[in-house]
Image: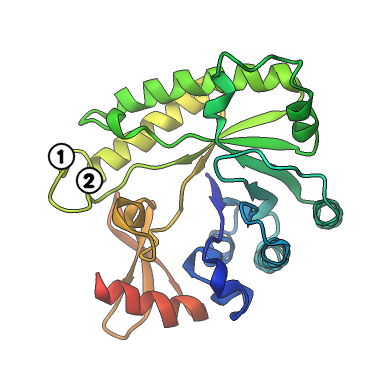
Amino acid sequence: MMLATCKNYTERNFWYKWNETDSISQIATAAAEINRDADQLLLNVSQGIAWDYEDIQVRRMEAENAFTSAKYANEIYPGTVSSVLYNFGNEFKTITTHLSEKIRQEASTMGLRIGGMLDCSELISSDLHWPENTSLTRFLAYFDFVVCDETTYANEYSVDPSVAVKKMGKRFMQYSDNLRRARPSVSIMLGNLLWPSKPKGNEMKEIFNIENMYKYWTTVGKWAQENKVEVRMFEAFDVPLRKGVLAHSGWWQATIDEHGIVWYMEKAIGKLFFNTNIYAFSRELKYLILKI
């Protein structure tokens, strides 16, 4: 299973250590401990670098945190973090900066690939000319792979998740075709997929539930195998810091036992399988979980 993680609580980056910024920064470490306990590479992580900020200091801190997280996780279980992933938000930004070259060098030294997460919806616009769009071609040349941000459109959620998967798959194949016209060798993945296990309130309970979440991911898995597409989840674990349905989009959720220990439960089967002494979880998540 492929996972991606990007930290986006900017103000915390300047005041806390890399593993205390927010719970999202713990995903690589948690995945590494799961791999270690299973003695096999079950989870593979792309460690995120939030790049959609104008402040170069924020970008630099994001990069430093990403590589520290990757190194820490891979020391627990080698190969857990296989790449770093730029998150560009919903617009293309230049990659030709001094910091970007330092990131490339650091990634190469650590044996990590470099990816970019893009909003690929513009790639099927009729006013784009392929492969004459040389700026995009140069942009893509920096990356080993591209992840198309492809969350399900709000009007496509339905009682039958297979309907959403079918529409999502059709769009992705269009993205893929256009990207390969710009750079034939680029590896293209499908990312940011989610199906919340809880609704925001009482609305859409028949859609946002664990049963449909399980069916959605099962269908996505079959589609990905048939079409030979690599897929990345939006989040591996629920993140209570997020608002609304985004807080319940992970495959696992944290829970606290009577001793105040944080465990993780696989929602589909209800099995408690993992506990952690990670500082940020025990200090921050415990408080948040008890609030919701």
Give the vertical position of 210 relative to 133 (above or below).
below
For the residues labelled 2 and 1, say whether their Cβ atoms are less than 8 Å apart: yes
Give the vertical position of 140 relative to 291 (above or below).
above
Q: Measured from the top left, where is residue 154 in percent x and y? A: 31, 35
- Mark 1: amino acid: Glu
- The quadrant of the picture occupied by the C terminus is bottom left
Q: Is residue 41 left or right of residue 254?
A: right
- Mark 2: amino acid: Asn
Q: How many circles with numbers are drawn on the protein?
A: 2
Disc marking residue 209: 2
SS for dot 1:
loop
Give the vertical position of 159 relative to 69 (above or below).
above
Point 56% across, 30% down: residue: 120
Q: Is residue 239 left or right of residue 33?
A: left
Q: Measured from the top left, where is residue 138 in percent x and y? A: 80, 31
Q: Is residue 13 left or right of residue 74?
A: left
Q: Which colour style is shown?
A: rainbow
Q: Measured from the top left, where is residue 111 in percent x and y? A: 81, 52
Q: In the depicted view, which residue is nearer to us: 114 or 214?
A: 114
Q: Is residue 184 visible?
A: yes
Q: Residue furthest left?
A: 202
SS for dot 2:
loop
Label 2 and label 1: CA atoms lie apart by 7 Å
Q: Is residue 43 visible?
A: no
Point 55% across, 18% down: residue: 125
Q: Residues within 10 Å of mark 1 (few under 14, many from 20)?
A: some
Disc marking residue 206: 1
Q: Is residue 23 left or right of residue 94?
A: left
